[in-house]
Amino acid sequence: MYAGSRTAGTDRRAELGELEGQLAEARAERDELAVAERALERMTGQLAEERASIGPVPRQMGGRTVMLVPHPEPDMEEDALPRVYQCIIAAVWQAAGPIMVRKVGEPLRATP
């Protein structure tokens, strides 16, 4: 009986040792994930700041230079849009009701 309990105790110790190793690995992985999460948060903030400061950038499409319009965000201001888009928005806001495209286009001819 003593030999059997010794084997059971040895088996238990081996199992505990294995579980402790797994626990140590899980803790190390958790710590690595925490560091990665902090880095991601920091980089996300930096990218948001950079995107906000860049503004529209001209690109070549179909052999022509065009302004790319940024994707709208809930707190985006009109001044993040290219000047011509700002003029379109202003013309529509100034209209007392429905407005024809021609009326929106007239102020655009004077836009630099």
Image (cartoon, grey):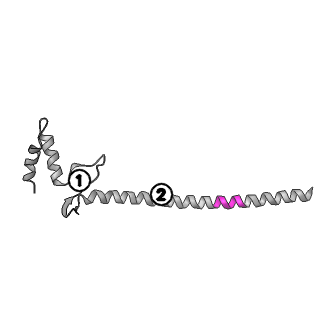
- Do the residues under discs 2 and 1 have CB atoms within 8 angstroms? no
**Quadrant location, the C terminus:** bottom left
Q: Quadrant of residue 64?
A: bottom left
Can you give x and y, in whole percent of width and height, for residue 24 in the image?
Answer: 64, 61
At x 90%, y 59%, the residue is 3
Q: Give the magenta-colored segment's residue range.
A: 18-24
Closest to the observer: 104 or 23? 104
Q: Main SS type for the magenta part?
A: helix
Q: Secondary structure at mark 2?
A: helix
Q: Amino acid at mark 2?
A: Glu
Which residue is the site of mark 2?
A: 37
Can you give x and y, in whole percent of width and height, for residue 11 in the image?
Answer: 80, 59
At x 8%, y 43%, the residue is 103
Residue 80's disc number: 1
100 lies left or right of 38: left
Residue 21 is one of the magenta-drawn residues: yes
102 lies left or right of 51: left
Residue 98 is one of the magenta-drawn residues: no
